[in-house]
Amino acid sequence: MKLLDIYAKMKSDLDVIEGQLARSVTTDHALLSDASTHLLKAGGKRIRPVFVLLSGKFGSYELSVLERIAVPLELIHMASLVHDDVIDNADTRRGQLTVKSKWDNRIAMYTGDYIYGKALAIVTELENPQIHQILSKAMVQMCIGEMEQIRDFFNTKQSVRNYLLRIRRKTALLIAISCQLGAIASGADRKAANLLYKFGYNVGMAFQISDDLLDLLGTEKQIGKPPGSDIRQGNITLPVLLALREPAIAEELQEQINQIQLSNGAGETKRALNLIRKSAGIGIAEKMAARYINKAIAALGDLPNIPARKNLTDIAHFIAKRSY
Amino acid sequence: MKLLDIYAKMKSDLDVIEGQLARSVTTDHALLSDASTHLLKAGGKRIRPVFVLLSGKFGSYELSVLERIAVPLELIHMASLVHDDVIDNADTRRGQLTVKSKWDNRIAMYTGDYIYGKALAIVTELENPQIHQILSKAMVQMCIGEMEQIRDFFNTKQSVRNYLLRIRRKTALLIAISCQLGAIASGADRKAANLLYKFGYNVGMAFQISDDLLDLLGTEKQIGKPPGSDIRQGNITLPVLLALREPAIAEELQEQINQIQLSNGAGETKRALNLIRKSAGIGIAEKMAARYINKAIAALGDLPNIPARKNLTDIAHFIAKRSY
């Protein structure tokens, strides 16, 4: 089944989630509502809610319960994006912090805090401490992932393992618990919840690797921002690390990255991008993403063969081929 | 009993809390540990843990349970301070964002997020969804309070009610739930928990009003920063609002505040401070703080007459007289 067909089949439930998302960030505080609603309208694939709902099919599917997992997980994802923007926003000002950007940053930070809080307030309506524990532990790991990303900016000596650990915390974990909590909340058995966690974790790893590939290979139109944003920001991703291991280009690529770092984000990335694109790193990273997808699909093998299992498989295949 | 004597009596339990606080922010991520530990060492009165522990005396006092309330509440307080600093830090640079300050801000933001997450991870170890609900709802309200403070910067037309609602969210609520959750976690009855909430709420209101008075009346040595920091930042506190209602000084004070606003934090506050100090606003604000303290102590009246009740009364009196 195509991705759009899966979404179409889930439309009425996803519409409920969408409505709850909108309501959850509406306060009597205009500024906060505006900032949150703006963010919400920016949309997204709502992949976490989709995984929550599909995982809920392996237990007793109750939308009124699952929405209290799906909405908080999407809110946590949104809040993490807002906090990323606090920094990015400042960056675009090239070290100059205008009153307006200062104001925006302040609002962005508290909007993020507020959305995190709302997520927790909604999930705690489910009187299941295990769910609260899993979620709060994941939030801690996500923060550590964000800090690791900062620590590792422009660190071209980091290991591939280091990269994988970072994206595990930054991305894969939240997708893993989307599946796991959907299963737990619907009363699926422990084995199913664990297999769905495994599925989500592996899909999440593939998802981030694909995202990092897209930033190097995509066009500005495809990715909504100029390619090479990661490298400009100092975020050294898997294909870059792999390219840096190729003797034929290592030295020149390192030199280009040094220049990008020295230019404080204003430098030209064209040469570096060309080197990476022609490197074997691209193909190896693609293979690694494919391997994670295969592991994800293998985890589904031990689950009952219900339509949701096929949907999850299809979504995993879609993520593997991702080129939007 | 003097405040120091109360702390001395509680020392061994507070030491346990202190140890847990230190452990809770220790990660294998050096940068994060350093930033959090630095913050922790800055100390503070640990008033929230003290209230948790004393409130726990109204039920079955179990330190191993109460520490999972006391530590998260202090962590949430700390995290909110870190996020305040994200902005203040940028301010001190007078609109110029150096690489170092940018780095610090980024770290401060994620350190705050991380500490919030840790607080939740610890409190969810107590398998009591009601506690998780109360805490997450309070966090949402605190964020709204922070946003309201930003919205109301330099708004001299705001009502006293507006100020009171803001400090309720910003300060009083967390102190109120420190008492309430201490009671709930120790299995005290609902009535006791509600009375302790009421005590904490009123103490919290008095605490913030006293804090705002101190920023106007204290010396730099007493408050650890130059007096008038609030007004420089645009935070219009109760005594200022009251002074602005006095016909004899209203116009000149408004003029001074306008100049402070136009100077973007660099202006002279001496004249404004003198006007406020001589105004009747000081006395009225002091009376309002005293009234909150009286309400707090009255709430204790219906609780069993155990030593903790006397301790809470003494702390409330101390806050009323606060001049450190």
Image (cartoon, coloured by chain):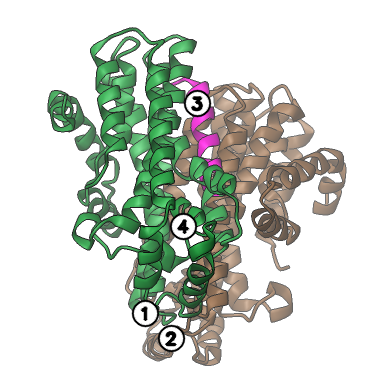
Chain colours: A brown, B green
Q: Quadrant of residue A180?
A: top right
- Kindly report the distance in space between the C-alpha atoms of the residues bearing marks 2 and 3: 44 Å
- Kindly report the distance in space between the C-alpha atoms of the residues bearing marks 4 and 2: 44 Å
Say which amino acid is labelled 4. Answer: Val
Task: Judge left or right: residue A39 versus residue A101.
Answer: right
In the image, which disc is placed on residue B99?
1
Frontmost of labels 1 and 2 is: 1
Residue A9 on the magenta segment: no
Residue B130 on the magenta segment: yes
Q: Is there one chain holding both mark 1 and mark 4?
A: yes
Frontmost of labels 4 and 2 is: 4
Tell which subunit mark 3 falls on.
Answer: A
Q: Is residue A186 above or below residue B157?
A: above
Q: What is the number of callouts on the image?
A: 4
Residue picked out by circle 2: A264
Q: Is residue B229 above or below residue A118?
A: below
Say which amino acid is labelled 1. Answer: Val
What segment is highlighted magenta in the picture?
A: B125-143
x and y percentages locating residue B88 in the rendered image? 39, 66
Residue picked out by circle 3: A130
Q: Quadrant of the N terminus of chain B?
A: top left
The answer to whether marks 3 and 4 mark residues whose Cβ atoms lie closer than 8 Å is: no
| Pick the front one: B123 or A251 | B123
Residue picked out by circle 4: B240
Residue located at (48% from left, 68% from top): B253
The answer to whether marks 1 and 2 mark residues whose Cβ atoms lie closer than 8 Å is: yes
Q: Is there one chain holding both mark 2 and mark 3?
A: yes
